[in-house]
Image: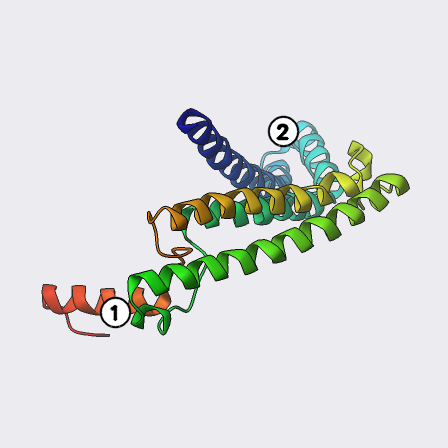
Amino acid sequence: MSIVMRVWNRLEEGLVALLLAAMTLVTFAYVAISNLYNVFYDLADAVPWLETPAFAVGDFLLDLTQSMTWNVAMTSALFAWLIFIGIAWSVRLGAHIGVDLVVRLFPPHLRRVFGVIACLIFMAYAVLMLTSSYQWVSSLMEGQVGVEDLDQFGIKEWHVAIVMPIGFALVIARLVEVLINILRGRQEGLDLSSETSDALKLSEDNEQSGEPRS
């Protein structure tokens, strides 16, 4: 079981890194190409004997830039995948923001009870979203409508939207893992990121280091 979890964790992290890298690469390529053709036009004006090849390269880059109308749509599609894969990843990391100032006033056994309740509510919401998104994706698969600006690559709307049920299925799996840990006493709740706790910890660290408060 531990091997499966390690593989799952690595695949999840790798997919998030891949999506971030792809988004960065697409954006960088478009910005670089869209600013590069001016360099060759300026070179053609400055060096007469390079005028013909420089203008040819500049025209090619300009045409390429104008044809890359798909870059925004591609980045948006990748970002959608990143969001829904990242939801489950954030559950594992405890990166979702939570307000637990009142809950922390209770003893540990009651905090675990609140943790179970919160986990079940979160799970019910994820199941609802999984069911609804599955129905939505099913209708998109029947329509086979292409994504605007991405249909030239054969990308359909359901290719992008399918990440929604996948993401919530992963969220449910992560919540089951959290629920088991709570019931076994390994953690008290969802281990959400608390801005209040972070601020208090930062203040304590500043006081210990003697740094003035900002």
State the residue position of label 1.
200
Which image quarter holds the C terminus?
Answer: bottom left
Q: Residue at x 81, y 32 (%)?
A: 154
State the residue position of label 2.
50
Q: Kindly tell me whether residue 80 is visible in this rendering.
A: yes
Which amino acid is tagged 1? Leu
Depth check, front residue: 38 or 130: 130
Label 2, residues with CA under 10 Å away: few <14, some 14-19, many ≥20: some
Say which of marks 1 and 2 sits in front: 1
Depth check, front residue: 168 or 177: 177
Q: Residue at x 78, y 45 (%)?
A: 137
Q: Kindly tell me whether residue 144 is visible in this rendering.
A: no
In the rendered image of this protein, does residue 169 appear above or below residue 126?
Answer: above
Horizontally, is 185 left or right of 89 in the view? Answer: left
> Disc 2 on helix, strand or loop?
helix
Label 1, residues with CA under 10 Å away: few <14, some 14-19, many ≥20: few
Which amino acid is tagged 2? Leu
Horizontally, is 104 left or right of 120 in the view? Answer: left
> Disc 1 on helix, strand or loop?
helix
Which image quarter holds the N terminus?
Answer: top left
In the rendered image of this protein, does residue 41 appear above or below residue 2?
Answer: below
Depth check, front residue: 19 or 193: 193
Circle 1/circle 2 CB separation < 8 Å: no
* Mark 1 or mark 2, earlier in chain: 2
Q: Residue at x 57, y 46 (%)?
A: 172
Horizontally, is 100 left or right of 83 in the view? Answer: left
The percent position of residue 54, horizontal first and vertical second, equals 65, 32
- Calculate the distance from the C-alpha at mark 1 to the C-alpha at mark 2: 64 Å
